[in-house]
Image: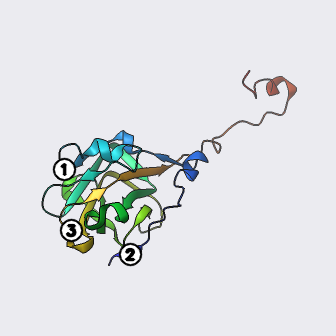
Amino acid sequence: MATKVTANPDLDIFKEEKEGKLREVGNQAVWSLSSCKPGFGVDQLREDSPDTYWQSDGPQPHLVNIQFRKKTTIHDICIYTDYKADESYTPNRISIRAGTHFNDLVEVEQIEMSEPVGWVCVPMKDVNEKPIRTFMIQIAILSNHQNGRDTHLRRIKVRAPVQDISSAKIPKFTSPELLQYAYIR
């Protein structure tokens, strides 16, 4: 069953990154696509511009594969689409899968979008409502608006929670002799 989501052009997905709560980890992964038109591949998908995009070139489902070198905690996947610019190239149903490799991927979330313009952030939660830990994520475009064949995705961000090191065990010095070691000079 697909979850209906709406895109929000005013959503500031960078707010939590600026506050130090989340970080983009897509640059730590190896990205591959099921197909692409020349000049519309991974580089355009990963650019920080909503004017560039990935364009598939083949049969559906269209796939974006994101493989990490080590098991990585994923908070959410943010996808930028623009129905006004792309029309029938805009995804309608997307399946997000996770696993250790291509052969054991399990669907984590399936979303359905209606004429999205802007960012859609999909939380990646396990059965205990905690962020998933995975080696691989696959984003599968199952269908497009107006029964379009190829697809456009303008940006994808993979975000992880920032580990809080403030809770590390820091000794509490009470004597004047040891208090001198409490601060870095």
Residue at 79 percent of width and 33 percent of height? 173
Considering every residue shown, the one lying at the far left of the view is: 59
Residue at 22 percent of width and 57 percent of height? 63
Image location of residue 180, percent across then percent down: 80, 23
User: In the displayed structure, does residue 135 sit left or right of residue 63?
Assistant: right
Between 141 and 89, which is closer to the camera in this rendering?
A: 89
Circle 3 is placed at which residue position?
Answer: 148
What is the crowding at mark 1: few (fewer than 14 residues within 10 Å), some, or many (at least 20)? Answer: some
Above or below, 139 against 169 in this view is below
Question: Quarter-wise, where is residue 138 in the image?
Answer: bottom left
Q: Which mark is residue 3?
A: 2
**Type of amino acid at the residue the image marks with label 2:** Thr
Image location of residue 130, percent across then percent down: 47, 62
Q: Is residue 43 visible?
A: yes
Image location of residue 155, percent across then percent down: 37, 52
What is the crowding at mark 3: few (fewer than 14 residues within 10 Å), some, or many (at least 20)? Answer: some
Kindly report which numbered mark, 2 or 1, lies closer to the viewer in this rendering. 1
